[in-house]
Amino acid sequence: NIDLLATDNSNFNDYIGTIGYNLKEVRGREHIFLALNTTSNILSDLTVRKAIAESIDKTGITSNVYGNKYYTCNFPLEYGSWLYNSSKNSNINYNLEQAKQELVDNGWSYKNQSWQKYLNNKTQKISLNFVVKASDESKKAVAENIKTQLENQGIRINLIYASDTQYESYLQNKNYDIILCSNYLGISPDMTTFFGEGNLANYSNEEITQIMNEVKNTTDEKILKEKYEKLEQIYNTQIPYISLANSKYNVLYNSNLVGDVSPNWYNVFYNIEGWYK
């Protein structure tokens, strides 16, 4: 008797079978990402940040941890925001050999199953503190998956399972190299979490400050489009963050329902005025 149902339960056919309805998948607004502390001793090196990004298999995470209930993504606004330019794909892709070569080209050496470099009169290894909230089982599984991937590349990871209170303290004090985060993106695009003052990656420069001020003080769609494309470029070239996945949900609708059923992230009932049975 139901004509349309939206659910994030991927096992829906256990309840309603496999016939009598059509299915469309829609990107959700939960965004899962890594914040890289760009002021930490090791991660201040862009080459290391890039090598980390190229060493993470996002598809493996969405498949093995989330059972394909999430989409891989490269930018927070990829959920369908009008300010996201889908034609400008990230230049960072899963590529283990390229990650290794870039480290070598930047003076890092692979010895005894770890990367090291002589810096400030001592040998420095790529060894990073990675914080995850202990109470979130799926996030723990994601963090453990990433730890395994990075350590297979010779990037040492100290995984810190923080209580909820400890996790908030880490966020407030930026006392980490990497932290696994998630947020629910609003209907109105806002990159303050990522580039605003005191952001999670401790990333700032004059250009970012100027862009963030400009997007707050204009409603001109052309200018906003240009500025957000620049933010996307900085996000993907300077790598203060690594976007991992966005949630998705399923919209199931009766096969007898006629019309343009085009659900999206902000309105399941988009075009409802043209539906009929």
Image: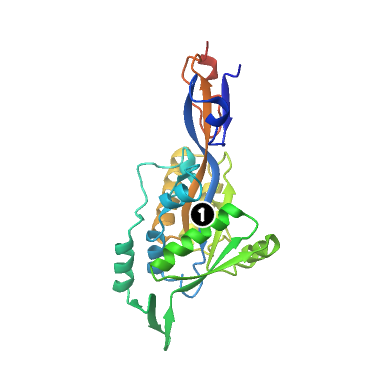
What residue is at 43 percent from the left and 78 percent from the top? 125
Is 57 on the left-hand or right-hand side of 132?
left
**Residue 148 in which image quadrant:** bottom left
Quarter of the image where the N terminus is located: top right
Q: Is residue 147 visible?
A: yes
List x then y, in percent, for residue 178: 52, 65
What residue is at 52 percent from the left and 22 percent from the top? 253
Is 95 on the left-hand or right-hand side of 30?
left
List x then y, in percent, for residue 21: 50, 21
List x then y, in percent, for residue 164: 68, 60
Q: Nearer the viewer, residue 122 or 254?
A: 254
**Residue 50 in which image quadrant:** bottom left
Q: Amino acid at mark 1?
A: Phe
Q: Nearer the viewer, residue 27 or 163?
A: 163
**Residue at disc 1, secondary structure:** strand
Q: Nearer the viewer, residue 141 or 42?
A: 141
Q: Is residue 76 visible?
A: no
Q: Check disc 1 and report the residue beneath it.
A: 33
Snapshot colouring: rainbow
